[in-house]
Amino acid sequence: MRDHLRSLIPPGLRGPGNRNLPPRQSLSGYCSAVAHYDADQGWQGPGPWQERLDRIHAEPDPGVRNVHITRMYFDLGRSMEGVLGDLDANWLTFGTWASYTAGRFIRGEAMPVSWGVGHVADGNIAIIEDIAPCFIAYLASVHGSSSEQQHPLVVSGRERIEASEHLADAFASYEQARQRMADPIDAARAQLILRGNVGVAYHEQWLADCFVDRAMPLGGLFGIATTKFVQLDLPHVSLDLCDPVPTPDYLHGRMWPVELESIDDVGLAQIYRRIGQHPEDVEHSAARSWEDFDERMGFIAVFFRAFQRDPSLHAAPTNSHP
């Protein structure tokens, strides 16, 4: 099926059609960057995070830059686990694997077409520069001193949260979940984290929309055909985004973690309805065209709910993953 769809793509837009290794410079940077993932050392203030964002911004090689972005997602996610625990994946946990997947596109390993790579790389850096300050500001609100609260990076993140209805609700949900840490298997707490995750995703997919449109400029049937090649790489499986979200292996036949089997949180249920997803429906989670915002968010919201307690997602991605 995929070979047939590839034959429909104009020859001038086709890539090599295989998963070639990235260029030497990118591969070298990739291996060195993923060789050592630092253990979470707790809150060290906004300064080190600002240095990492500066290094990401200055990196000219998009493949190497992606690796540093993916690693920053991973490390920030570990810091959030120090606040929310590691039973439930937070948005950064999912963001790590989304960025890892984007890296395979950027390095030409995942698509049969060569166009659009630059837009994927642009979206990769735009999203982390937008969302990382927000998570850092939230961590500073929990751990930071009064002087750290005035750091420009923290102020920027706080302003971004306050300016966005979805981010404000997401981080308020994370904070409510943090306050329920005494009961880590509490269903209400799990739903608050899911509400935070989906809220951040809603904001970030709105930002990503223009980059997705530029990467899939022909739209229509061509956009549907291109989506057939788009997969999300996870530690033990790659998910086809054009198919409904599958039953996760870690749940042994169940679709949802027990704590997320029913959606009782009113705000979370409203988000699902807003994107056209019934809380009990899985069949409509397939994203036939990834450029369609509602279809993209439908897949993400169902995927987040099903995989929120998958322990394998907390692993650091390496070039040995699929």
Image: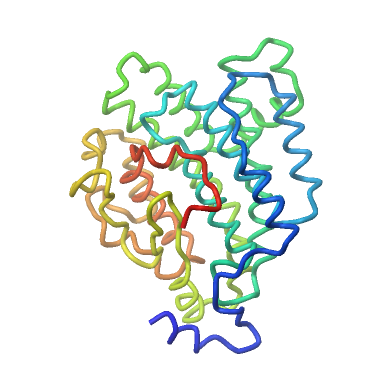
Residue 278 is left or right of residue 231, and the answer is: left
Q: Which x, y percent locates residue 200?
A: 51, 41
Image location (x, y in percent) of residue 213? 59, 67
> Which of 58/176 is in front?
58
Q: Position of residue 234 (x, y in %)?
A: 43, 51
Relative to 176, say whether 89 is above or below: below
**Which of the 4 quarters of the picture holds residue 282?**
bottom left
How was the colour assigned to the protein in this rendering?
rainbow
Q: How many numbered discs, if any?
A: 0
Q: Position of residue 191 (x, y in %)?
A: 33, 33
Q: Which corner quadrant holds the N terminus?
A: bottom left
Q: Nearer the viewer, residue 120 or 65?
A: 65
- Most extreme residue toward the top is 146
Q: For residue 104, what is the image quadrant?
A: bottom right
Residue pictured at 64% horizontal, 75% vertical = 114
Q: Residue furthest left?
A: 253
Establish if 240 lies above or below 124: below
Residue 221 appears left or right of 71 = left
